Amino acid sequence: MPNKLSFTRVVLCLTLLALMGLPTRGLASQQPCDRFALNNQAVVMESPDADSSAGASVLPTGLAKIYSNLGTGNNVYSSFAACNESGSGSPHGIEFQPMAFTPNADYSVKRIDLAVSWIYGNNDYILTLRADNGGVPGAILMKWPHVAAANYGTCCALETVRVPRTHKPVLLQKGKQYWLVVNLREYAWLVWNLNTTNTSGKGALSHDGKKWIKMTFNTNGAFDVLGVRQP
């Protein structure tokens, strides 16, 4: 359960949101994602599903970029501007804002890097790679149940997850839309840091994790998807 200091921090967060004129609930389609911005330091937990890296400017040997909106150097993603991601026990209530991408060829997924930061409550989150279902997230293709979020207000550590070598190939088809979805524990308030490459794209919004509203975000959360091109 959250301690007194955590609740105090949340009250401060909400107060600053109001003063800054930022939204505290979801926005309609064709809008920026519901954003959060606050300089708040956090402690990162260790996670069996993810490791931190100092950005992804160097492409790993043998892998190709399926999708990427990451920057470079000390500007891999925005340290403060971010899309809200919150669980049912947070003061904000449930709000999930997944990001979509579309491969330009057939690939087998090997690795995903993304910038998700901790604000309040439980530090780790569940990441799923999903197929598309009529323009919103659909069937789960791969799931990472314990991914530790990075420090909010800093750059440029990324959470990195990989498809285990023992797992059957996760294949993506050219021209089809896919989704990355951040699901949270009950007492969790995280954010998905925005990209710094001015990349927009398809997204979605849910206040229960089941029903989705189609969105087009002016600026997407920062991430990349790496893999091996298929013949």
Image: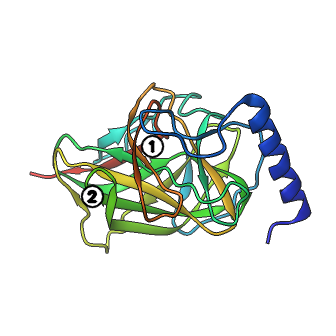
Q: Which mark is residue 93?
A: none
Query: Dot 1, crowdedness within 10 Å: few (<14), some or many (≥20)?
Result: many
Locate residue 82, reporting x and y percent: 59, 39
Which residue: 27% across, 58% down? 133
Quarter-of-image position of residue 198: top left
Which residue bears the numbered disc 2?
133
From the viewer's side, name the closer residue of 125 and 59.
Answer: 125
Q: Secondary structure at mark 1?
A: strand
Can residue 206 be seen by looking at this rendering?
yes
Q: CA gap, disc 1 to disc 2?
A: 21 Å
Amino acid identity at mark 2: Asn
Q: Badge 2: how crowded within 10 Å, few (<14), some, or many (20+)? A: few
Q: Is residue 105 left or right of residue 165?
A: left
Estimate the x, y position of residue 190 in percent, counting from the top left.
64, 53
The residue wearing badge 1 is 223
Q: Name the residue furthest left.
A: 231
